[in-house]
Image: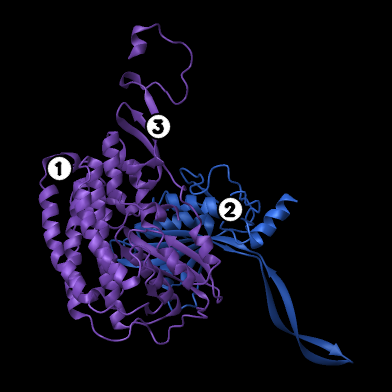
Amino acid sequence: MTRAITEPIDEELPPSFTDGGDEGELLEIALGPHHPSTHGVFRMDVVLDGERVVKLKPVFGYLHRNHEKIAETASYLSSMPYTDRLDYMCSLSNNWAYALAVEKLAGLQIPERAEYIRVITAELTRLQNHAGTIGFLTQEMGASGTPLMYAFREREKILDLFESLTGSRMMCNYMRFGGCRVELPPGWLEQTKKVVEAFPRFLDEYERLLTGNEIFMARAQGVGVLKKELAINAGVTGPMLRASGVNYDIRKVDKYGIYERFDFKIPLGEHGDVYDRYMIRMLEMRESLKILNQALRDIPPGPIMDVKAKIRGFRPKPGEAYGRIESPKGELGFYLISDGSPNPYRYRVRPPSLINLTILEDMCCGYNVADTIVIFGTVDIVLGEVDR
Amino acid sequence: MLEKIKSDIEAAVPGCRLEIIPNGSPSGQHSLLVEPARAVEVAKFLRDSPELRLDYCSNVTGVDWLDTEISEKVKVNTLVNGVEHEIEEIRKRQSPGYLEAVYHLYSMEKKDGPVILRLRTENRTDKVHLPSLTPVWRSAEFQEREIFDLYGIIFDGHPDLRRILMWDEFEDHPMRKDYVEPDDYEYEPTAHDDVLAKAKQHNA
């Protein structure tokens, strides 16, 4: 403290440097928007007391392009490729959520085979998203690169499958209202089976690196605890919510698609800390593999599009629908209002990434800056979806 | 099911005006229009009622309904040459527009839902107020800020009502249906077609 040894200063302190008593001065800084740990362009205005966070305000909008307004000026189908750009790690889940909402709005049926393809692609998406999230998390803890590259090596295999199916690695634009766009290419199922069979080996290796790792446990256990009641009230969904011990998975609750046919469990956390959020994602990947094994075994032959579905001149009757799925990040919902015209009158995306950030301040207050980065990493956001 | 919820609310919050808004689509998700002045009481009842336990407010969004002209056919009796005739006449009346906040509620405890609440403003001017439901469900915090930002509904009782996606100095509300986008296009390096025409018009 330089002030203690000099003459006391009478002039008023600037508002950002208020007197923090014995604790020292408070310091206001902006974490981001251009910082690798913010996963995109995102800013956290934090007030620090030494190294401790006392206040944190997230600032959004750097990637805002008013996706909803654009979708209201375009036909239903032409928004489908745009949904890829929301959560660009999980384009196939976004496709499904949008297709599901439109199918509810127009009352379309989906053929059996298309439902199976949807489940397979969505669960593959979950695998690569969770593996990547854990990779980034360890990166932010200081494990420079190695676990992340392990995750990306596996992700690459899944993206290759997406590319051979849809023509694109990340911007898949694959689902249509009433089914899927193209039939599986020859040998795709066999290739997928190979990837799924090899995946547990990667998970075991990953767990050996991390689950019992002393540094990882010291950084993760008891950090950023989120209480069950707050999580429910703040609308937190996905692995974040289940790590706090709330048994709520839309795959089980809504039973959308054909999820009721599969035998899988919902892993639940106990403490709601960073370690639980990591562990939930690990366990969810194993459950996803179970679903994939069953779906790949049972997938029937048949059409992949509803014969009554209209691609051109699609005009749903006036009305509204809210459709939601369990995306890897949480509840992804689409709310649509039709006025009978080819464009939706209202098109709304319920972004899990944005709403899961509501409690960021509650989780981070009292922790060091380095822990804040780790806690933020476990929320698992993609800025394309936060800002839309 | 919605009729039962309606009568439950009427019993718990006496004198509250409620209306079921039917939904014509196959989704069959009908919604409940709630009087804004009593909305917080209704929300608290829905959250805490042991039968409903709608503890999770999933989606909060705004909708802009423009003024519409409604044409109706009315039968009028008029005297033509001393004899009374029934004549069909088309009458037009103006239905005033309004802004709407829509809340999708689910129950995590009962694994039930959705129950859809709608709150309507009186008109669609710049000073329209609705009560904030953020004190009841924290998940509405960012979503109500987004409605304030993009639709211009002022939520009374919101703890931190600021713009969220647009910058603080921005003045209009871009999601409104009558929003006019700026025509200067100074960011457009190679203006062409209608963009060029608009830019020329702006600079003239």
**Residue A15, position as x, y percentages in the image:** 47, 25
**Between A34 and B116, the one nearer to me in the picture:** A34
Q: Please say whether residue A253 is visible from this viewpoint.
A: no
* Residue in front for this viewpoint, B200 or A105: B200
Amino acid identity at mark 2: His
Circle 2 SS class: loop
Query: Looking at this rendering, what residue extends furthest in the right direction?
Result: B81
Q: Position of residue B74 (x, y in %)?
A: 72, 83
Residue B29 to residue A43: above or below: below
State which mark lies toward you, 1 or 2: 1
A209 left or right of A31?
Answer: left
Task: Name the residue carrying label 3.
Answer: A29
B82 relative to B193 in the view: left or right: right
Chain purple in the figure, letter: A
Q: Amino acid at mark 3?
A: Ile
Q: Is residue B144 left or right of residue A360?
A: right
Residue at left offset 20%, top offset 65%: A288
- Label 1 sits on residue: A217
Compared across the picture, whether B195 is left or right of A244 comes to: right
Query: Which mark is drawn over residue B173?
Result: 2
Q: Callout 1, which amino acid?
A: Met
* Tint of chain B: blue
Residues tagged by mark 1 and mark 2 found on one chain of the structure: no
- Pointer 1 indicates a residue of which chain? A
Q: Considering the numbered disc 1 on the image, is that residue within a helix, a strand or a loop?
A: helix
